[in-house]
Image: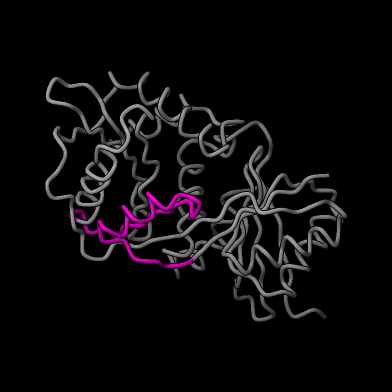
Amino acid sequence: MHPESWQLTDDLDDFLARAGGFLRSRPALHTVPLTVTDTLRRHGSRYHGAGAPLFGTLTAADGTVVAALFRTPPFGLYLTPVTIRQADALAERLAGLGHRLPEACAERDSAAEFARAWQRRTGVAARVRRRERLYRLGELTPPNPAPPGRPRIAGPADRDLLIRWFGEFARAIDEGAGRDAGAWADARLSYGGVTLWEAADGTPLAMAGATREIAGQVRVAPVYTPPELRGRGYAGAVTAEVSRAARAAGAEVLLFTDLANPTSNALYQRLGYQEVADFTVWGFEE
């Protein structure tokens, strides 16, 4: 008998019953599955698209969950850290069931192992699409001096702006397909999950979002400034305000950056964010 086995399901409640404790055991490293499953629990398992979601846990012989995954079509697979053998067993299982994956994201080494295993099991080409870094807020150091303007929590009157800016952000990071900007805006507005940096006359200049607190942590995302307004400090100011508010509420504060963008990585480090782990998104092309 194999000492570990992958259990797959499309039932969110079943998945959370098995994996919830495991995910909460390392909330920073598991921030994405924690926040995504919380969103699905609140807004329905088809929140991200019409396709049936996929959830999975890897269970050791003693019943302990040692890894987990989820997929919400049309998006790719998200996987917690795994060993080479575990990655290969998952690739074999998914390929045998006929799954087709557009991409996979995981901690850097785990992502590479799964990408190699998936290529080996399916024959598809694999290439790196994006390299990301997860940061945790240490001592917050707001910009000094702050740029002109002030923070304001977005309200219902800002819905059209949030939809437009989120669409622009999603396209900029090549995640435009399948994203329902209206549903995203409504979900964030329901709990004050977007802060705007606005000029003295009320003109919005930049935005920073924050997930709901779960397992003691909040993730700042997304941060967006329209191209014509960049380079003026608005992103740093609004990120600092969102970070301050989350910290004041007692949460551990996290965020991801694209490692291809040295400007944003330098900005967040100046604000007091410290490296936690690197992640990679691998794309698969048949």
Residue 56 in the image: x percent, y percent? 66, 58
Percent coordinates x, y for residue 201 in the rendering: 14, 20
Residue at the image point whose x is 36% and y is 34% from the top: 188
Where is 98 relative to 117, above or below? above
- Asked if the magenta segment contains residue 81, the reply would be no
Residue at 50% x, 47% y: name it. Answer: 36
Q: Nearer the viewer, residue 193 or 105?
A: 105
Q: Residue at x 75, y 48 (%)?
A: 284
How is colour applied across the structure in the image? one colour
Give the quarter of the image for residue 88. bottom right
Q: Is residue 81 above or below residue 148?
A: below
Q: Is residue 230 left or right of residue 77?
A: left
> In which image quadrant can residue 158 be found?
top left
> What segment carries the magenta color?
248-277
Tell me where residue 23 appears, x and y as whole percent. Answer: 50, 64
Position of the N terminus by quadrant: bottom right
Q: Residue at x 67, y 75 (%)?
A: 83
In percent of width and height, residue 117 lies at 78, 64
In the rendered view, tell whether residue 141 sits above or below residue 232: below
Quadrant for the C terminus in the image: top right
From the viewer's side, name the closer residue of 154 and 234: 234
Q: Quadrant of residue 175?
A: top right
